[in-house]
Amino acid sequence: MRICHLREKEVINICDCKRLGYVADLDFDPDSGCLCALIVPGPCQILGCLGRDSEYIIPFPCVRQIGKDIILVEIDPGKCLTRCKY
């Protein structure tokens, strides 16, 4: 599967059935070349006007299934949601 195909899939948390968004970026281990995590933009700030200041960093072992249209993950959103560094 190509990276561009992953970006077209919506990420859904199976713990609470919430939609997290679409894959924005991937984290790779430069030494092994293995995929470490999916990065999904976090929730919008006030009414979506101020953009986003956080992102979900979902470790690849938390990915349960990659389907035709969606990616199912099993995460605790509070632990995977981090503030953006930019």
Image (tube, rainbow, N blue to C red):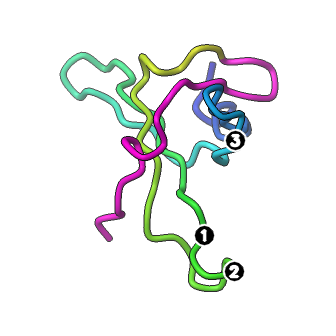
**Residue 54 in the figure: left or right of residue 29:** right
**Residue 1 in the figure: left or right of residue 10:** left
Residue type beneath disc 3: Lys
Q: Nearer the viewer, residue 78 or 84?
A: 78
Q: CA distance from mark 1 to mark 3?
A: 15 Å
Q: Examine the structure image and report whether residue 79 is included in the region drawn in magenta.
A: yes
User: Residues at badges 3 and 2 in contact (C-beta under 8 Å)?
Assistant: no
Rate crowding at label 2 as few (under 14), some (14 to 19) or many (20 or more) other CA atoms within 10 Å: few
Question: In this picture, which residue range is highlighted in magenta?
Answer: 66-86
Q: Which residue is mark 3?
A: 18
* Residue at the image point whose x is 42% and y is 46% from the top: 78
Q: Which residue is mark 2?
A: 47
Q: Which residue is mark 1?
A: 44
**Residue 26 in the figure: left or right of residue 43:** left
61 versus 29 height, above or below: above
Judged from the image, the secondary structure of the residue bearing numbered disc 2 is: helix
* Residue at the image point whose x is 34% and y is 18% from the top: 34
User: Residues at badges 1 and 2 in contact (C-beta under 8 Å)?
Assistant: yes
